[in-house]
Image: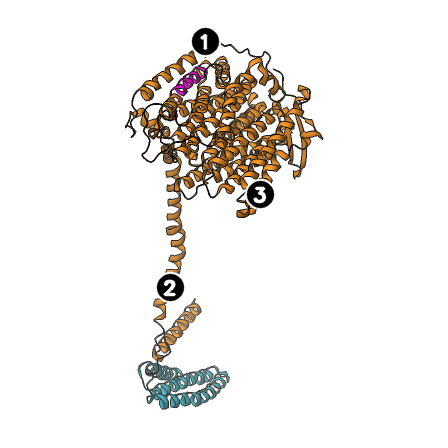
Amino acid sequence: MESPAEIIPHSGGVIGVSWLMIALPLIGAAVLLLGGRRTDRWGHLLGVAMSLASFVVAVASFMELLGLDPEQRRRAYELYQFIPGVADMGILIDPLSISFALLITGVGSLIHIYSIGYMSHDPDRRRFFAYLNLFVAAMLLLVLSDNYVGLFIGWEGVGLASYLLIGFWQFKPSAAVAAKKAFIVNRVGDFGLLIAIFTVWTTFGSVAFGEVFGKAGEASQNTLTAIGLLLLLGACGKSAQLPLQSWLLDAMEGPTPVSALIHAATMVTAGVYLVVRSGAFFEAAPTAQLVVTIVGVATLLAGAIIGCAKDDIKKGLAGSTMSQIGYMMLGAGLGPVGYTFAIAHLITHGFFKANMFLGAGSVMHGMNDEVDMRKYGGLFPVMRITAITFIIGYLAIIGFPLLSGYFTKDGIIETAIEHNAILGWLAVVGAGITGFYMSRMVFMTFFGKRRWADDAHPHESPAVMTVPLIILSIGSIFLGGFLVLDNRFMQFLAPAVGRPEELPVFHFVSPAGLATLALVAVGAVFAWFRYGAAEVPRVAPRGSFLTTFARRDLYGDALNEALFMRPGQWLTRIAVFFDNRGIDGLVNGLAAAIGGTSGRLRRVQTGYVRSYALSILFGAAVVVGALLYVGNM
Amino acid sequence: MTTHYLVLSALLFAIGAIGVLTRRNAIVVFMCVELMLNACNLAFVTFARQHGNLDGQLIAFFVMVVAAAEVVIGLAIIVMIFRTRRSASVDDASLLKY
């Protein structure tokens, strides 16, 4: 295998000012947050403008990068000294980071535009755009930083933005709780990432990507495995992979554009970025790599199973997001070929999942914010653009031939089967389940009998919302094929992640591909009989044991409660008891003992001269007796 | 030879002490204190005689001087208490307590 290209110091050109990508949305966020209500009238326009400007810089940088020789396409430059001797704030523009930057600013801008319509009735729209801009800036810092410390700052920044946006409607207790949950679960992952960065620093004496990856071979196997597993823990937290998946489903309490941008297209994929970026460590630590693939497969199955039982359209999509990121993780554990497909799938997923989330938002917009799919049904004729774009996203995610997901997901599955047949075929099964639950979602929402609430008057959303949907659905159709065929994306990414010895050839007909298609078809047909042809009850039936299992998120919350929350509560109760009874008891007891004794001793002061005289006499007798005793000795 | 004096001294001291502890009239208590002082004086003088030096006698004079001063102050206090409270009982003057 050919290793990644050297990172070359850069100056001048558009790449030289590519830090503007981060700075512009950050300025937008600052103006909107500090400006307060004065900016209410034009705040959303500023937000969109800053995001679009960032996109323009990203495209210009991308063009400039394309103009260079492939071997020259990793450019880095220092902005300023951040922590002297440890980390400088620097920007790294290479094929991997620019792919992310394009996705973040491109899809991000579309979602900004969509939000103008979606949030038009919200009195706090300005604050919403401020947070969105803050998110874009933090996410770009995460992917553009040329060292782990800068990456970590971005990592925490997106966590903060995610917290603020999940809890955007903080007057709803469920939203406030969900935001807190996301933040706390992410702390566990961040802890792993921090320790990983500390380990990298102590092992290699640097945190800059350019220095540490070249030295990866010098460290011992155990150290590398530890770094890999700790990085994976960080990735699991941010990307909602098992065992830190529980926050993502609750995160759907946030406004729908947030679910689309942060909890589907970009932030949750940061874990995949981290694993791919740190590929040099993982390639030198096969154990860690294997764990990455196992986590990926476990999550892709878990997410798919959860998706099957959710009646809340957003939670169904969230389960699907978990599952798709599972595929990316699986790819990210498979070396350079896997990286390419993982990132390609990440980008196409960013399009079709954002497309479907925004479609779901458009449906909710027309249905008085109803999210229960059992109250939808037969919406196709009343919102045709939303329905058609949603169905395009749906066909892309289940891997309908020649659409985006078909190329990228199939690539991951094929690569996985080559590496490890069991994991690969489990991923095929996951694709079949995807076919079922996504079809269920489409049939329940757009087809079948109308089960609307009495006061529902569904209508198509305004153009400001449908145009982004159309653009995203075009991406959902063509992007996958464009990236995968002729190994275009692999050639492009090679300088950043390394080039495999022989490039894979995409087979339109292959055993795994046919099996995937067959399973997806079975899942879709089964869904048609259950939810398309048959009548869907308006109240969810009790269902079997399996349905309950999936509906309760595979008992993930119950498990966390039993394993961590309750013991934690016991611990605090023990600590409180010890504090009240032990420490306070000692202090208060001593005081009470002294108080009680002196209260009794006080009684000696009777005020009678006679009793004082007696005690003097007694004392004198004792003194005399003692003197006699000593004298006789 | 000097035993009798010492026994007498001890007896006088004991009578004085019992008087101080048992009597309530301030004047009587005061007299008993004087009795104890003089019992001590007797013991001092006896020991001076026994040891053949003047130390004991010297101390006895000191005691007398102090006793005289004490009588002046003590009687003044007793008179003041009697004037304000119309009573010379030491038990009545028991306000300064817990």
Q: Amino acid at mark 3?
A: Ala
Disc 1: which chain? A
Find disc 2 in the rendering and name its residue.
A595
Q: Which class describes the residues within 10 Å of circle 3: few (<14), some (14-19), or many (20+)?
A: some
Label 1 near label 3: C-beta < 8 Å? no
Residue A614 within the magenta-colored segment of the rendering: no
Q: Which x, y percent locates residue A240?
A: 46, 30
Chain identifier of the orange chain = A
Disc 2: which chain? A
- Rendered shade, chain B: cyan
What is the secondary structure assignment of the residue under circle 3?
helix
Q: Which is the main secondary structure of the residues drawn in magenta?
A: helix
Q: Nearer the viewer, residue A183 or A620?
A: A183
Q: Which class describes the residues within 10 Å of circle 2: few (<14), some (14-19), or many (20+)?
A: few
**Label 1 and label 2 in one chain:** yes
Is residue A322 left or right of A48 when viewed as pictured?
A: left
Residue A11 appearing in the image: no
What span is in magenta?
A: A423-436
Find disc 1 in the rendering and name its residue.
A511
Q: Amino acid at mark 2?
A: Gly
Q: Quadrant of the N terminus of chain A?
A: top right
Find disc 3 in the rendering and name its residue.
A30
Q: Nearer the viewer, residue A254 or A92?
A: A254
Q: Which x, y percent locates residue A362?
A: 44, 31
Q: Quadrant of residue A370?
A: top left
Query: Tag on residue B38?
Result: none
Q: Earlier in the sequence, mark 1 or mark 2?
A: 1
Q: Nearer the viewer, mark 3 or mark 1?
A: 3
Q: Which x, y percent locates residue A505?
A: 55, 10
Q: Nearer the viewer, mark 2 or mark 3?
A: 3
Q: Earlier in the sequence, mark 2 or mark 3?
A: 3
- Disc 2 and disc 3: Cα gap in Å? 60 Å
